[in-house]
Image (tube, rainbow, N blue to C red):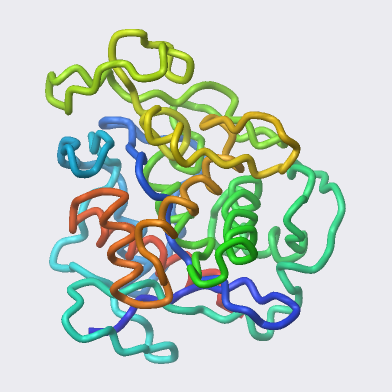
Amino acid sequence: MTTPRRSHLATGLAVLVLLAGTGWGVHTMSGSRASGSEPPQTVDAADTALAALRGGGRQPVTAETNRPLWQSEIDHAAGWSAVPAPASGKITAMSGESTPRPAAATDAGTGADPQAATGPDSGGLGEDTAGIDRRWLLRTAQRTGIPARALQSYAGAAVRSERSVPGCGIGWNTLAGIGYIESRHGTHGGHRVQPDGQVSGPILGPALDGNGFAMIRDTDGGALDGDTRWDRAVGPFQFIPSTWARYASRAAGDGAEASPHDLDDAALTAARYLCAAGGDLGTAAGWTRAVFAYNHSQAYVDEVLAAANAYAKRAGEP
């Protein structure tokens, strides 16, 4: 078995920023499709799998996951359980692992360093506080079909995590894979990610009242989800409030309170969770452990794997 391809954001020292998804509370809207962020049309196995993401179901939350795993928007492509890397980027998976980690798709020949210093961006992008090169951002958004503002959140979270937890190796395309599965990059229900990172309206899961889902009584007084009786998954990464309270991270570093409805904050919080759950995400064992902790479902791990691989390949095309 081969590992999937890992996208990396080269720093000035060519440090790999591996991909990894968030970590504890992602859930998608049941039976719906968010507008404005269809998967890229591609021809190889990874891209075919990504193009097939469009509806289906996930398992209910268990006590172990600490989050509701309600309906995903992804159907499994028949016959695949893990997407192999293309011949140009094969890496042997660790022995005994049923699912490999995403592997690297280099940015060789594409010009811009994604960590080159930039200032405030226009054209729907927010102020850049992570040092993401605007040229890389716009080029990669065009190639992958990920909205540029959402990609800015994923890349920023990967870069910040590499600085704060250098042994983790989390990267933007796992976050992008999870972001696509969970909320179509913040566009579920016709919403959009605004230049400041806030989603234009709340993305809320169903009440976790035990009726088809886990039973999780209110833990936040309705502060995040507006429900004072039951918890609901919230935001573009679909955190349950209790998990958000434990891992919440403010991307801007301005001392303000982090919000699960802010894609910058949600992506960074997700990265923090995955690093805590997986350890070294540069290994098959670590990556699989992290994503499985995010959702205790092998099918979900496979879905993230397929999406992350497809995004990595698209980003690396000349």
- Residue ID at (17%, 37%): 63
Is residue 312 something that shows in the picture?
yes
Disc tally is 0
Say if 306 sits above or below 103 in the image.
above
Q: Where is residue 33, by image quadrant?
A: top left
Using the image as rendered, state which of residue 96 and residue 87 is in the foreground.
Answer: 96
Using the image as rendered, state which of residue 179 and residue 239 is in the foreground.
Answer: 239
Using the image as rendered, state which of residue 133 and residue 292 is in the foreground.
Answer: 292
- Residue ID at (38%, 49%): 23
Say if 200 sits above or below 24 in the image.
above
Q: Where is residue 43, by image quadrant?
A: bottom left
Say if 191 sits above or below 64 in the image.
above
Using the image as rendered, state which of residue 163 and residue 267 is in the foreground.
Answer: 163
What is the residue that sits farthest to the top in this orientation? Answer: 228
Q: Where is residue 101, by image quadrant?
A: bottom left
What is the residue that sits farthest to the right in this orientation? Answer: 119
Is residue 192 something that shows in the picture?
no
Say if 129 sits above or below 172 in the image.
above
Pick the quarter of the image with the N terminus. bottom left
In the rendering, at what x and y percent does residue 108 appear?
A: 64, 85
Pick the quarter of the image with the C terminus. bottom right
In the rendering, at what x and y percent does residue 221 appear?
A: 41, 12
Horizontal relation, residue 201 to residue 219: left or right: right
Horizontal relation, residue 176 to residue 142: left or right: left
- Residue ID at (54%, 30%): 261
In the rendering, at what x and y percent does residue 272 appear?
A: 49, 52
In the rendering, at what x and y percent does residue 24 appear?
A: 35, 44
Horizontal relation, residue 264 to residue 209: left or right: right
